[in-house]
Image (cartoon, rainbow, N blue to C red):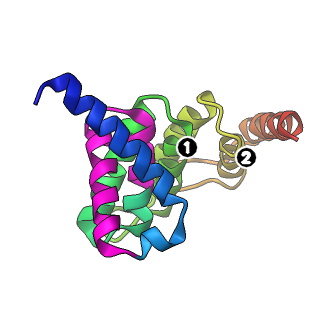
Amino acid sequence: MSRLLWQVRARLGYWLARRLFHWSWTLRQPRLWQWMQGQYGRMANLGDTPAQSFYGHILLFRGQGLGAREEGLRLLRLAASGGDGKAAYQLGVQALQGDTRQAPDGVQAVRWWEMALAAGHPLAARRLSQVYLEGAPGVTPDRALAEQHAALAQETQVSAG
């Protein structure tokens, strides 16, 4: 099968799987859900940033086991590097939470949230303000930076509302 035909097929399958995702009964059909995940994975492997973000979130929150979680985080890192603010924000949340294998890392969380803020994520400034106000592992409180980000969060909230 030619590469162009393969890409068209992948895009059509992904489009259909995204539409089916909004119908709750499709998520309860194991074979259909497996097919849908295959479409998400195929599109993410093509380097599509929104697909990487979408499938990364699915694997992180609905995936089964540590392997699915790690693959979800990998896809979110790729999406964040591609400019996806939602993926960068979620990586910041995960970095600050830590897990059984990695301690909470405030410095890493700040890095991801700054990336999310640059991409226009509406909650990134609020989280940065909170981290700079209260401090976090590796981040000392800085009132000036906290106020600066709080003002940014306020501006974002006013423009969004």
Asked whether residue 60 appears in the rendered view, the answer is yes
> Is the residue marked by circle 1 packed among few (<14), some (14-19), or many (20+) residues within 10 Å?
many
Instruction: From the viewer's side, name the closer residue of 133 and 75.
Output: 75
Question: Residue 57 placed where, x, y %?
Answer: 45, 55
Extreme left residue here?
1
Residue located beneath label 2 in the image: 126
Question: Residue 28 placed where, x, y %?
Answer: 42, 76
Residue located beneath label 1 in the image: 86
Determine which quarter of the picture holds residue 101: bottom left
Residue at screen point 28% across, 59% down = 35
The overriding secondary structure of the stretch rendered in magenta is helix
Residue at screen point 51% across, 51% down = 90
Residue at screen point 53% across, 70% down = 24
**Left or right of 119: which side holds 108?**
left
**Left or right of 63: which side holds 118?**
right
Q: Is residue 60 above or below residue 123?
A: below
* SS category of the residue bearing label 1: helix
**Left or right of 107: which side holds 140?**
right
Where the N terminus falls, by quadrant?
top left
Q: Is residue 94 above or below residue 147?
A: below
Q: Is residue 37 magenta?
A: yes
**Left or right of 155: which side holds 43?**
left
Q: Amino acid at mark 2?
A: Arg
Residue at screen point 34% across, 45% down = 13
Q: Amino acid at mark 1?
A: Lys
Question: Residue 147 placed where, x, y %?
Answer: 80, 39
Q: Which residues are magenta?
A: 29-57
Q: Is residue 140 magenta?
A: no
